[in-house]
Image (spheres, rainbow, N blue to C red):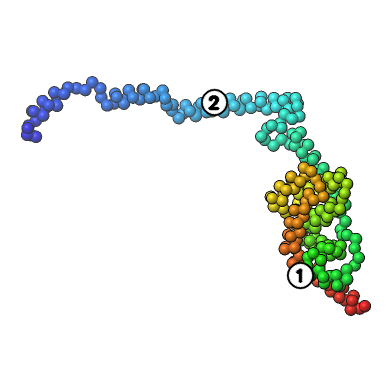
Amino acid sequence: MPFYDLSRWRHYVFSFGTPSTTAEEENEGITEKIQPFFKPMGSERTEMRKRQTSVAQETPSSTQAQPDEGNQGSNACCFCWCCCCSCSCLTVRNQDERTRAASHEHRTDAIPDSEESSTPTLEDVNAWSQSFDKLMRTPAGRNAFREFLRTEFSEENMLFWMACEELKRESNKKRIEEKARLIYEDYISILSPKEVSLDSRVREVINRNMLEPSRHTFDDAQLQIYMLMLRDSYPRFMNSDVYKDLVQLLSEKSAEA
């Protein structure tokens, strides 16, 4: 069929007839079906404002009811996730912490600044440089070394070692249990300001030994702290002004004599 034969083209076009619905009508029908599932943005904002208003009106009444509930029991807020300064459990905890801190301060004040010892000779001081064991054997050597540790804020290592030595000399069972508990609170507990540095293995051993305390409860910990002082603090002590000044003072005295 030639493309330019308009009469035949007109016959084919009108043979299909007029469609029953147009595209616009179909779109309107679809819109009516899905419209219940969607709401305009304006309506959503209106509903959100209504909800916020209702919540704001309910909030004062709920806050007024809280004091009445709190009066029923002092532990009402103990299970609340928020921080409550008036909570009784926190008050008790703060009191315990204050008591523990006061006990630590009292024990610190009770510890003497140094052991009773005679004045070391020049030979004694020179022997300290030969080995750490010779230094730790004499009270004068421990006093000098402790003075140096105090300047490095690590005096608790020497205090712990000395407390363990004192525990080993105890024979009374009740006294052993009491001293072991004090040593644990003063030097092992993570809440103590004088906690010594121990690895997890040694801490586990101590926790097991504390079930039945004995004179050897802290042997592993004492050895670990001894080796720490030997490797870390002792070399610095030998090069410190504390040791050099002591050697110079004793040398001058021996020269005058």
Q: Position of residue 72 (x, y in %)?
A: 75, 25
Q: Is residue 59 visible?
A: yes
Q: Nearer the viewer, residue 36 or 217?
A: 217
- According to the image, label 1 marks what residue? 239
* Crowding at mark 1 (Cα within 10 Å: few <14, some 14-19, many 20+): few
The tag on residue 30 is none
The residue lying at 29 percent from left, 26 percent from top is 24
The residue lying at 69 percent from left, 25 percent from top is 65
- Contact check, label 1 and label 2, Cβ < 8 Å: no
Labels in figure, total: 2
Horizontally, residue 201 falls left or right of residue 183, namely: left
- According to the image, label 2 marks what residue? 50
Q: Secondary structure at mark 1?
A: loop
Q: Position of residue 28 (x, y in %)?
A: 32, 24
Mark 1 or 2, which is nearer the eye?
1
Q: Position of residue 143 (x, y in %)?
A: 85, 62
Establish if 33 lies above or below 141: above
Q: For the residue marked with disc 1, what is the amino acid? A: Asn
Q: For the residue marked with disc 2, what is the amino acid? A: Lys
Establish if 252 lies above or below 145: below
Labels 1 and 2: the sequence-earlier one:
2
Q: Position of residue 180 (x, y in %)?
A: 81, 47
The residue lying at 38 percent from left, 24 percent from top is 34
Quadrant placement of the N terminus: top left
The residue lying at 75 percent from left, 61 percent from top is 229
Q: Residue furthest right?
A: 257
* Crowding at mark 2 (Cα within 10 Å: few <14, some 14-19, many 20+): few
Question: Which corner quadrant of the image does residue 89 belong to?
Answer: top right
